[in-house]
Amino acid sequence: MNIILLGPPGAGKGTQAKRLVEERGMVQLSTGDMLREARTSGTAMGNKVAAIMDAGELVTDAIVIGLIEEKLQGDIGGGVIFDGFPRTLAQADALSEMLTRNGQTLDAVVAMEVNDHELIERITGRFTCAKCGAGYHDAFKLPAAEGVCDVCGGTEFTRRKDDNEESLQTRLTEYYKKTSPLIGYYHAKGQLAWVKGLGSMDDVAGDIAKVLDA
Ligand code: AP5
């Protein structure tokens, strides 16, 4: 089963994708994670990507389509969760072509609905353990012992450079201008299902499971 998690920054795509990996053995393909890896390479391309991401703008279609194409050559046995891809109509067309070429189908597009106020609160409070990547939040999820990661005991934490109000406003504008047209695109194909992203993480996971099991 191949699915897309579609939603604005902070909707909970990454959080829910990780649960699906654990619960269903699916493969998470996050273009955001791939680009964050690329930016650490120190290459000219990596530096260009870093500047675009920090500003909250979208990286070019050619770069992200290339990244996904490469990953789809590998083992995707349990199916793929596309997290943060596609983000433009050109990327959606490219994904459709890639899947068809590989004899694969797209089984569902889960659109996650969260209002802007909640998105801003979620994103500006988010931080992760520098050692193991476990996620925390200033208001919703602090480590049990202050300054110590619950998972690995690490004591250093990082915040994403684009998790500030200015970049976030650009990310939201990019989402409404370039990504939200995908809602109509997939609705017209009969593939779109809405879930409310505002409930607890367990409630949202339950709603996604209902869509996937329908
Ligand atoms: P990307 O990494 O994809 O970032 P994003 O879409 O902005 O999404 P986030 O990771 O910020 O949010 P999320 O929806 O995954 O939410 P999360 O689960 O983390 O992209 C970054 C950049 O890369 C882009 O701006 C662009 O420059 C570039 N890029 C990436 N893909 C691209 C593409 N295809 N084309 C072009 N450019 C691309 O949750 C957020 C927070 O909320 C966490 O703290 C979490 O703990 C909390 N939370 C989650 N669910 C709940 C809940 N139910 N209740 C309470 N808190 C919750």
Image (tube, helix red, strand yellow):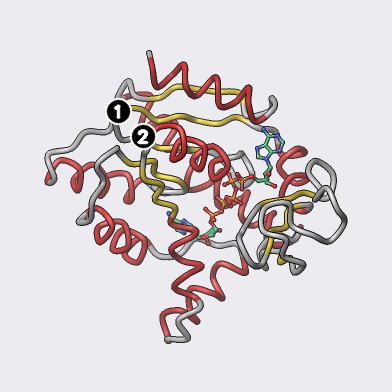
- Circles 2, 1 touching at the beta carbon (< 8 Å): yes
Q: Residue 154 or 108: which is nearer the viewer?
A: 154
The tag earlier along the polypeptide, 2 or 1, is 2
Which residue in the protein does label 1 denote?
Answer: 107
In the picture, the disc for residue 3 is 2
Count of labels in the image = 2
Asked whether mark 1 lies closer than 8 Å to ligand 1, one says: no
Residue 138 pos. (x, y %): 83, 50
Give how far across and how far down residue 143 sits, in percent: 80, 50
Spot occupied by residue 133 in the image (x, y as percentages of width and height): 61, 59
| Picture quadrant of residue 67 | bottom left
Neighbour class for label 2 at 10 Å: few (<14), some, many (≥20)?
Answer: many
Q: Amino acid at mark 2?
A: Ile
**Distance from Cα at disc 2 to Cα at disc 1:** 6 Å
- Secondary structure under the numbered disc 2 in the rendered image: strand
Q: Residue furthest front?
A: 153
